[in-house]
């Protein structure tokens, strides 16, 4: 498994931006895909975005498409989530996760296919 530490959450007004970072250690980062999920109070954890181990394959939830951008820097063992045009509905705890499959050819949106999770970072968007 890999250890993941998120940062960059906070309080922002609607329409604002935040950039989340997730630093990885303990496993060869550049061989595994990465994902971002979120969980709002009283709701199930949901998929937000994922990026393949090469960075060439990316997927987004429909609710964030066009507003959020996932990227990775394999030299820094870090994955990012740039969040623009934030809405109150984006308020949640955001988690990064590492794919369990070595060299997966694409991306996966299923939480059970990720075997390592960060502690989460709170994002609050005020109206």
Image: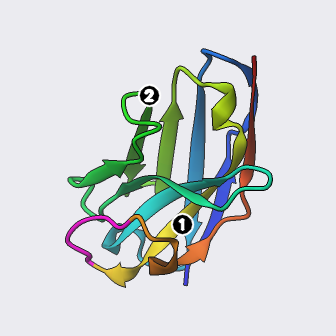
- 76, 102: nearer the viewer: 102
Instruction: Kindly identify the residue that appears in the image at 65 percent across and 33 percent down.
Output: 89
Where does residue 126 sit, x and y in percent of width and height? 77, 21
Residue picked out by circle 2: 67
Magenta-span inclusion, residue 104: yes
Does residue 77 appear in the picture of this structure?
no
Q: Residue at x 62, y 53 (%)?
A: 38
The structure residue drawn at horizontal position 71% and vertical position 45%, both measured from the top left corner, is: 92
Q: Give the foreground label among 1 and 2.
A: 2
**Residue 70 spot, x, y in % from top left:** 41, 44
- Residue 98 seen by the camera: yes
Instruction: Give the number of callouts.
Output: 2
Residue 123: x and y, percent? 72, 38
Q: Disc 1 marks which residue?
A: 97
Left or right: residue 119 versus residue 38 is: right
How packed mark 2 is, by other alpha carbons closer than 10 Å (few <14, some 14-19, many 20 or more), is few
Picture quadrant where residue 54 is located:
bottom left
């Amino acid at each position: 498994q890999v250890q993941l530490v998120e940062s960059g959450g906070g309080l922002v007004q609607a329409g604002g931006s935040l950039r989340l970072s997730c630093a990885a250690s303990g496993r060869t980062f550049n061989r595994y895909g990465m994902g971002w999920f979120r969980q709002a109070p009283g709701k199930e954890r949901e998929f937000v975005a994922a990026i393949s181990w090469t960075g060439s394959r990316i997927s987004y939830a429909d609710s964030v498409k066009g507003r959020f951008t996932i990227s990775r820097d394999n030299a820094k063992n870090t994955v990012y989530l740039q969040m623009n045009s934030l809405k109150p509905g984006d308020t949640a705890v955001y988690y990064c996760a590492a794919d369990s499959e070595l060299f997966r050819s694409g991306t996966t949106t299923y939480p059970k296919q990720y075997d390592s999770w960060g502690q989460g970072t709170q994002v609050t968007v005020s109206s």
